[in-house]
Image (spheres, coloured by chain):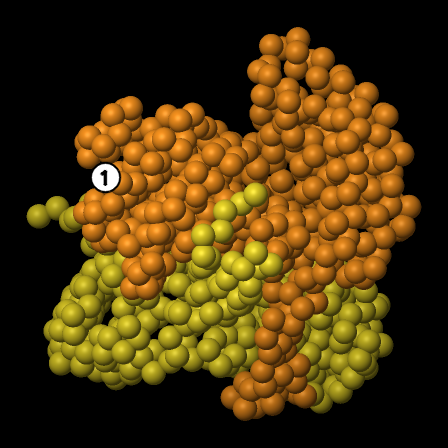
Chain colours: A orange, B yellow
Amino acid sequence: MDPTPVPELGRRAKAASRLLATTPTVLKNDALNAAADLLLSRAEEILEANSADLARARDGGVSATVIDRLRLTAAKVEGMAGGLRQVASLADPVGEIIDGWTRPNGLRIRRVRVPLGVVAIIYENRPNVTSDAAALCVKSGNAAFLRGSSGAIDSNRGIVSALREGFDKVGLPGDAVVLVEDTSRDAALEFMRQREFVDCLIPRGGPSLIRSILDNATVPYVIDGDGNCHVYVDASADLDMALDIVVNAKTQRPSVCNAAESLVVHEAIADRFLPAVAQAMPEVELVGDEETRRVVPRAGAATDEDYRAEFLDLKMSIRVVQSLDAAIEHVNEYSTGHSEAIITRDLDAATRFTDEVDAAAVLVNASTRFVDGEEFGFGAEIGISTQKLHARGPMGLAQLTTAKYIVVGEGQVRA
Amino acid sequence: MDPTPVPELGRRAKAASRLLATTPTVLKNDALNAAADLLLSRAEEILEANSADLARARDGGVSATVIDRLRLTAAKVEGMAGGLRQVASLADPVGEIIDGWTRPNGLRIRRVRVPLGVVAIIYENRPNVTSDAAALCVKSGNAAFLRGSSGAIDSNRGIVSALREGFDKVGLPGDAVVLVEDTSRDAALEFMRQREFVDCLIPRGGPSLIRSILDNATVPYVIDGDGNCHVYVDASADLDMALDIVVNAKTQRPSVCNAAESLVVHEAIADRFLPAVAQAMPEVELVGDEETRRVVPRAGAATDEDYRAEFLDLKMSIRVVQSLDAAIEHVNEYSTGHSEAIITRDLDAATRFTDEVDAAAVLVNASTRFVDGEEFGFGAEIGISTQKLHARGPMGLAQLTTAKYIVVGEGQVRA
């Protein structure tokens, strides 16, 4: 049987979104908890489906890293169920009155938080994104329109089937979660172009997926982009603190977008600080400018591409600068607008860096690794936006909503 | 001399935007007031430039309406100068702390309103948009990157030259306003694709311009789209109030996006109400369904296109519905998501309509004509967004900003 065409699936998600928009919080929570129960009671089937995906991946000679992301275990399914319950426990953003006022003519205006409608998520091999994304969408009153990778299609089908049945049990429309089962490239392109049905597209994946969105999407989107995050160590920095932060930002989890990729150091402390950095992170490949290589003999020469790179690996670029101005200029030139940190004891330097650096998050005396929805206290996150429109930085439930003006009068007409 | 290439102009605007982002409010205000002075002292030159545009338009056989939009007078130049001073008098949105909190680990997080950077505006024949848009962009700390029509190029050059000189007088970079002088179609397409330099594009124009943005733009944009605005007159409505509102919404200024285009009437009052509507607006062409035509013999038959149309003219579509549900369904089917009104005395009907209708603004017992920045109290507006991301509804200074997280610690690292 041919898979259902993408526009038909979009139409179903849109119809469900109309109902979800006015569904009471308690019912959405019940639905998420029922879905969690179903995931657990279906764990065996889901793991079997995942085995089929894994077998295909192995036959296809897929890398160990990708297989690791694809693999589900009983513990991971429990983690997914726990994620659904966790989102059920969060406050519902829908219905919040953001602001409101009365006009001189008596019109009462209020701005109310409402769901976006249909949130489309396109993602790569991690099957847990299926339930995580669906939970956040449904809790915020949106229908989740999902397009995972071909490599995870059996797992995704199993997970979505459990979610839909859980929702159905409490009376929420199953189409609150709609999975595109056609995993062809054409279907992916069609998915990015459902202007009639999709209110917001959020890609979860690497540079080639982002590139494809930029080139092909006609629906509104929020980009969860690269993080070429810098740590600038100022002349006045507490160097012990700076070392702890640089090591943490670079090595605590190098594969994530809020890990540091580049170190900028004031020349006044480069002689003392850089050898300590090189010694503290022997496992990290260092590339730097001439001054860096003078004080750290093991550092290679950094190219312009190195300064632009999000390594996502145990590699770091280093630049020595002569002033705070030069540091800010370097960061603004190479930043991807994610998270940028300064380590300093100088109030003026901290103020200038936070004022003048253009990024979603600017940190003073803290690791860039703190920039995510959990660490910000949002309870969960759908991604970290590196764009400026709609949402910037970690995106929680509130960023999956928009606003509606409600204007109440007693017959006012315009003169 | 060839006009400066679009990317080079974008680069200049971006450089200026870095300075504008941290420019104190008082200096931005001085710059706007100095620009207002310059507009007045240069009024004669600007009117001469406008005469050249008008002469070309007449030679080209351009319609009287377009010529009317293009024509400047001494009073209009004074109006533009007054607009600059008015924007100078508004509160500066930049630097507002939107929210903030302290995490259990001691990290202090605050979210601060900051400028977008470079705001690009592409617009049609009205030269006053040049100064209005520039004023709003600069007041909100953004560089204005402007691309007007070929028909108004001489006027726009004159206005921009006065603005730039005014800014320069008080020490603001002239490149706070950059005009694209190449008015070819190719340059317009290039303008929509300056991802490196443009943070937000706002089109000000009709359906063909919007279509071109949707098809060609690669920069982020906010669409100021069509308004197929409905007034639904409920069974319980005060019919005198309803008649006042329908007449106001339709006829007070039919050419604007918040004018009503479609009337939806509950069948219980159609017999009494529709003849009164037909009588009260003899100048308005009416098209309706069978029931409408039964009670209003002069009404023509409405097609599906009529129900979808933004007439912007003395024409109105009418539908008679059997229930509130049918009214909401009709509105959601044909709405462009701009402004939708219900006239009712029934609390439940008002609540359901405002909850279930999906639009930027939903009004109860008031004319759709109130949905704009001035009437909402924003002091000025750059447009009315009909999209859901970033800004929805009237856009004032705050909608020309984004947010930045500032995170301050004392050496925290992530475990």
Which residue occupies 32% across, 52% down?
Answer: A237
Q: Check the image and report above or below for B286 versus B143.
A: below
Q: Position of residue B132 (x, y in %)?
A: 32, 72
Which residue occupies 74% across, 64% down?
Answer: B356
Report the side of B27 relative to A220 (left or right).
Answer: left
Which residue occupies 38% across, 46% down?
Answer: A240
Q: Quadrant of residue A2?
A: top right
Residue B198 appears in the figure: no
Q: Position of residue B80 (x, y in %)?
A: 28, 78
| Helix, strand or loop at mark 1 | helix
Residue B379 appears in the figure: yes
Report the side of A237 relative to A162 (left or right).
Answer: left
The kind of residue tagged 1 is Asp
- Which residue position holds label 1? A271
Which residue occupies 66% across, 11% down?
Answer: A58
The quarter in which the N terminus of chain A is drawn is top right
Report the side of B137 relative to B415 (left or right).
Answer: left
Report the side of B77 relative to A406 (left or right).
Answer: left
Q: Quadrant of residue B327?
A: bottom right
Q: Check the image and report above or below for A165 versus A396.
A: above
Q: Position of residue B193 (x, y in %)?
A: 35, 44
Q: Position of residue A165 (x, y in %)?
A: 87, 40
